[in-house]
Amino acid sequence: MEDIFAEIEADAATASGVEKLGEDKLSSVSQIAEKMRLQEELVEGLNQSLKDAKQTLYKLRDDILPTALQELGLTGLSLADGSKVTVKPVYGGHISEANKKQAHQWLRDNGFGDIIKNTVSCQFGRGEDYKAEMFRRHLEEQGMEPSQKTEVHAQTLKAWVRERVEDGKTDFPMDLFGAYVGQQAKIERSKK
């Protein structure tokens, strides 16, 4: 490892005139670079630890604790420190790119097309304001090929799934919408 740093220092010195610096200044810069490298490794390790800790938290919150409470027939409980544990339903969904066309068609066919966002856009360069205005007025006449994007916003889909499920209307293809219904535990800390 020291050989690599020595080579880097030698290359840098030759390429940028660093050879004029004293050996102690070059050593100081090398030490700073080493500290930076170690700090980057530390941050990378901490980020991985945070990611792992979040996964554990989500497993406890979304699976283990709600299941344990359900097995005991409880919807919540109080902890010794006064904190309160409750379990509430959660809803969600995600339309994958592979299911997008079919899911959007199902929404349109079943009267829910209004939750689909439809964006048509085209980029213009500087000084093309007039062209942009003409595009807005006469899309095809301008010979432009605009891009079109349709989507159902994640929060809109989540609300739609919740509304359908809570109204007892589960007559939609949940797999197509990546829809799910689950339970989530929440701890409300006591105010001491």
Image (cartoon, rainbow, N blue to C red):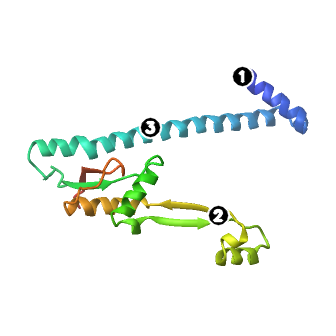
Q: Earlier in the sequence, mark 3 or mark 2?
A: 3
Residue matched to label 3: 49
Pinpoint residue 16: horizontal percent, then vertical percent. 88, 39
Residue matched to label 2: 146
Q: Secondary structure at mark 1?
A: helix
Q: Image height check: is 26 above or below 122?
A: above
Which numbered tag is attached to residue 2? 1
Quadrant of residue 40 in the image?
Answer: top right
Q: Earlier in the sequence, mark 1 or mark 2?
A: 1
Q: Secondary structure at mark 3?
A: helix
Count of marks, rendered view: 3
* Residue occupying the point 76% across, 67% down: 125
Tell me: 168 left or right of 127: left
Q: Are marks 1 and 3 in contact (CB under 8 Å)?
A: no
Q: Earlier in the sequence, mark 1 or mark 3?
A: 1
* Residue occupying the point 32% across, 44% down: 58
Quadrant of residue 17 in the image?
Answer: top right
